[in-house]
Image (cartoon, grey):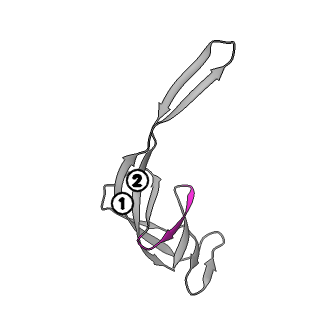
């Protein structure tokens, strides 16, 4: 059984026990989260929402937080002596999917 959910403006495919890497959540590790924006649930039959399924929810637990590897943002214009170098590390949270209820 799996579900497609919308969480913080992005869509994810979830199954029970899956670890999802999402944008940073302001919650301590071990905190329970309920996701109410369920777009699709597939089990014995497929339920599709328009846009969301009424009464369906996915429960998850915040597992950990971290930072991605550094990316370099380099802007350059030829013959104009314009160069800008900037680094960025995106923060993320890992959540573990618990139960999918439709």
The magenta stretch spans residue 15: yes
Q: Position of residue 20 (x, y in %)?
A: 45, 61
Which of the two residues, 58 or 84, is positioned nearer the viewer here? 84
The one nearer the camera, 74 or 12, is 74
For the residues labelled 2 and 1, the Cα–Cα distance comes to 7 Å
Main SS of the magenta part reads strand
Q: What is the number of the mark on residue 93?
A: 2
Of the pair 54 and 42, the residue shown nearer to us: 42
Q: Residue furthest bottom?
A: 44
Residue 44 among magenta residues: no
Q: Is residue 67 left or right of residue 52?
A: left
Q: Secondary structure at mark 1?
A: strand
Magenta-tinted stretch: 9-17
Can you tell which quarter of the image residue 10 is in?
A: bottom right
Q: Residue at x 67, y 12 (%)?
A: 80
Number of marks present in the image shown? 2
Residue 81 location, quadrant: top right
Picture coordinates of residue 58, whole percent (x, y): 46, 71
């Amino acid at each position: 059984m799996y579900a497609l959910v919308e969480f913080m403006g992005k869509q994810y495919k979830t199954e029970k026990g899956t670890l999802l890497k999402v944008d940073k959540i302001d919650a301590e590790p071990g905190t329970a989260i309920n996701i109410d924006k369920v777009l699709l649930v597939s089990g014995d039959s497929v339920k599709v929402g328009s846009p969301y399924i009424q009464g369906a929810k996915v429960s998850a637990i915040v597992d950990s937080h971290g930072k991605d590897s550094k990316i370099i943002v380099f802007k350059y214009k030829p013959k104009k002596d314009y160069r800008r170098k900037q680094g960025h590390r995106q923060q993320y949270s890992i959540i573990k999917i618990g139960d999918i209820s439709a």
